[in-house]
Image (cartoon, rainbow, N blue to C red):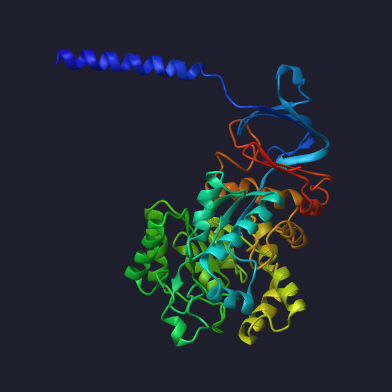
Amino acid sequence: MFGQMKFLAAFAAVALLAGSAAARVEPKGPVTLIYAGTLLDRPGQAPRKAATLVIRGETIEAVRDGYVDAAAYPGATVLDFRDRFVMPGMIDSHVHLDSDRAGVDGLVAGITESIPTHAYEAQVNARKTLLAGFTTVRNLGSGDGVTLALRDAIAKGWVDGPRIIDAGSAISTSSGHMDGRLGLNDQFREAIDIDNVCDGPESCRRAVRMQVSRGVDVIKIATTGGVNSVLGAGVGQQMFDDEAKALIDTAHLYGKKVAVHAHGADGIKLALTYGADSIEHGTLMDEDAIKLFLKTGAYYVPTLSTVNGYKERLANNPDAYTPAVRAKIEWRIGITGKSLKACYPRGVKIAFGTDAGVSKHGRNADEFELMVQYGMTPMAAIQAATVNAADLLGLSDIVGSLEPGKQADIIAVSGDPLTDVRVLKSVGFVMKGGKIYKG
């Protein structure tokens, strides 16, 4: 017993010395000073005029008023943006990096091109996104594992791209929006992997666990039909209560948030009733749905700029979509923005998301213009793409604002986005994790 006490005392002493040594360790890494003419360090709060960001290695060490004397940091790199607006790197909460194609073209590519081809395309799209000023994204659906691998490759520094929160394969019921067999003949249907398709509570629990085993960060499900679904079954609820509950409960059991594709109000309310963390699209919103958002604190991700992708593709090819899908697209174009106009004044939490892949990668900032057009202030739209999106993704401790200890994800633009949010379409400087990628 006495011997054990001596060992514990010695161990405690070593631990105390180690802790003291750790406390004395000086921060390491090269120093970069960014002089900002205007600094929006905490979106939602007033910006600072004439400020300095002190960056050491990958993180922000300090935020100072005025322009710090570089002599205080020997060897520091100075970036003089006294004529620019500086703010946090932006976050897109809804992308599909593995493709920039849709409609008939996307369907054909999906069955004729190899997985390695899709991997290269995903990397190209990731780089476009990063250079557009989006340093973090949430990728909501890629069945072949391409974006899961890309997430890890970017984290290791092998390729350039934004930080990725990935959902793996999105889940729906048979003939639901995520059923990859839709629109294919029987010969091809038999070859399609349907691990992400479920029917009944037990099957749905298994589908979530399959994605968890792949190492996903978030679970994506579809409680309604979709605009791009080849099946012409509308955009209303396509899942029973026990299935939605099983999906959401199982995801939460494993500590995963749940993003829910839902257009119709019935599917929105179904998802919110059982604890969804975000609703994607939310095209048809009624009073009961808004009350559920306010009660649960879930986020609404409007994805307004999908309509830009639809319009561009149809302008290039009137037959870009099948007749059944084209009818739903026309409906979506006509109704876009109405839900946001209803939700925002009521205090529903909004997170920025584009559904890029339906719209074009690298043009994510087009969403800002539509958000403002449909009722949000420029500051609120920027907040949706920074602090709100970081909160939704569970990353508030590292991104979303420019504060000491957080990642040095920083962009700079010419002009004032609080006056004209469209200037965010032309980002001149991009830093992610202290590394400069543009400018």
Percent of width and height locating residue 47:
76, 37
Q: Report the residue that reaches farthest toward the left.
A: 1
**On the image, which quarter does residue 361 sit in?**
bottom right
Q: Is residue 103 above or below residue 414?
A: below
Percent coordinates x, y for residue 166 in the rendering: 51, 56
Query: Which residue corresponds to the image point at 58% horizontal and 71% vertical from the top-left?
Result: 263
Which one is nearer the viewer's eye here, 16 or 298?
Answer: 16
Q: 162 or 224, which lies in front?
A: 162
Q: How many marks?
A: 0
Of the pair 188 and 84, the residue shown nearer to us:
188
Task: Tell me if I can see residue 166 in this picture.
Answer: no
Q: Quadrant of the C terminus?
A: top right
As drawn, 80 above or below 136: above
Task: Locate residue 13, reporting x and y percent.
Answer: 33, 13
Point out residue 349 in the picture as x, y percentages from the top left corner: 61, 54
Q: Residue at x 70, y 67 (%)?
A: 337
130 is higher (above) or lower (below) than 289: above
Quarter of the image for the N terminus: give it: top left
For residue 176, side relative to residue 135 (left or right): left
Q: Is residue 282 above or below residue 385?
A: below
Asked if one can make out residue 362 in the rendered structure from this viewpoint, the answer is yes
Tell me if 315 is positioned left or right of 322 in this view: right
